């Protein structure tokens, strides 16, 4: 989809809500909401400060380069329930384009890859190792159809780290733990966010 979109220059005037540095930038809003919740709680403040400093450093670096990344139309919600397969399991169609809009390809790739590899249906295996295998398969399939530009390759890990660490479902999970008063669980979730922000993914 990214390759075809770049070739045909599909004209959208809107940006995806999932796009970093876009008019909406849901990720930045989620980080802000999470910061307010942590600061008003008994959660591990020093851990959060470390996480936020890492996030801000990576974000500031990427923001300078963002206008130079390839960007065109994306489907916007490339999830398992929006893929149609035939009886042999081969992909035959993609549906649900209500979030279709412009986005930086690398941003869209990172968000979809992180979700599908580490959060979507894992068949009762939520280990990091299995996620790495799924991610490797996703990335290999993508690179068969579209090679990254040099700038995309240089920034791939940091975009992946941010998109995985602050994925909306992960932030919502932490906020739910706050609402339930499960501060020890909140701290464990923050440890996971820090892990995601520092891990080098197998690309």
Image (cartoon, rainbow, N blue to C red):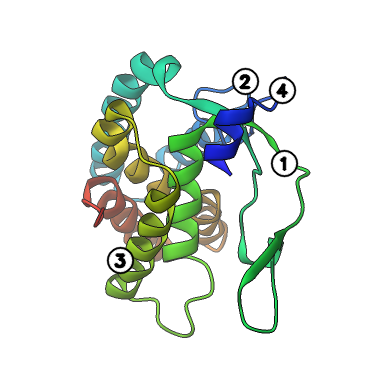
Residue visible at 28% across and 32% down in the picture: 155
User: Mark 4, mark 2: which one is toward the viewer?
Assistant: 4
- 174 lies above or below 108: below
The disc label shown at residue 11, or none: 4
Label 1 environment density (alpha carbons within 10 Å; few <14, some 14–19, many ≥20) = some
Task: Determine whether, in the image, residue 119 is placed left or right of residue 25.
Answer: left
Give the CA separation, mark 3 to mark 2: 32 Å
The residue labelled by disc 1 is 99
The disc label shown at residue 23, or none: 2
Residue visible at 61% across and 73% down in the picture: 90
Secondary element type, mark 3:
helix
If you read the primary sequence from the N terminus, does the residue marked by circle 3 or circle 2 appear first? 2
Residues under numbered marks 1 and 4 in contact, where contact means CB atoms less than 8 Å apart: no
Tell me, yes or no, if residue 166 can be seen here: no
Give the CA separation, mark 4 to mark 3: 35 Å
Give the CA separation, mark 1 to mark 3: 27 Å
Query: Residue 129 in the image: x percent, y percent?
Result: 27, 73
Quarter of the image containing the N terminus?
A: top right
User: Mark 3, mark 2: which one is toward the viewer?
Assistant: 3
Query: Residue 4 in the image: x percent, y percent?
Result: 59, 38
Secondary element type, mark 1:
loop
If you read the primary sequence from the N terminus, does the residue marked by circle 1 or circle 3 appear first? 1
Give the CA separation, mark 1 to mark 4: 14 Å
């Amino acid at each position: 989809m990214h390759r075809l979109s770049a070739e045909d220059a599909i004209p959208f005037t809107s940006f995806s809500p999932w796009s970093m540095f876009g008019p909406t930038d849901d990720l930045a809003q989620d980080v802000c909401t999470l910061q307010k919740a942590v600061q008003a709680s008994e959660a591990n403040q020093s851990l959060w400060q470390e996480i936020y400093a890492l996030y801000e450093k990576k974000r500031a670096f990427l923001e300078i380069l963002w206008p130079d990344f390839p960007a065109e139309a994306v489907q916007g919600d490339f999830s398992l329930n929006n893929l149609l397969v035939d009886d042999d399991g081969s992909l035959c169609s993609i549906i649900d384009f209500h979030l279709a809009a412009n986005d930086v390809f690398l941003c869209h790739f990172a968000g979809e890859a992180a979700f599908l590899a580490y959060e979507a249906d894992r068949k009762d295996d939520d280990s990091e190792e299995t996620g790495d295998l799924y991610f490797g398969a996703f990335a290999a399939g993508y690179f068969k159809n579209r090679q990254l530009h040099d700038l995309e390759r240089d920034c791939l890990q940091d975009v992946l780290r941010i998109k995985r660490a602050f994925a909306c479902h992960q932030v919502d999970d932490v906020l739910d733990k706050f609402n339930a008063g499960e501060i020890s669980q909140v701290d464990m979730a923050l440890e996971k966010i820090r892990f995601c922000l520092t891990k080098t993914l197998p690309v």
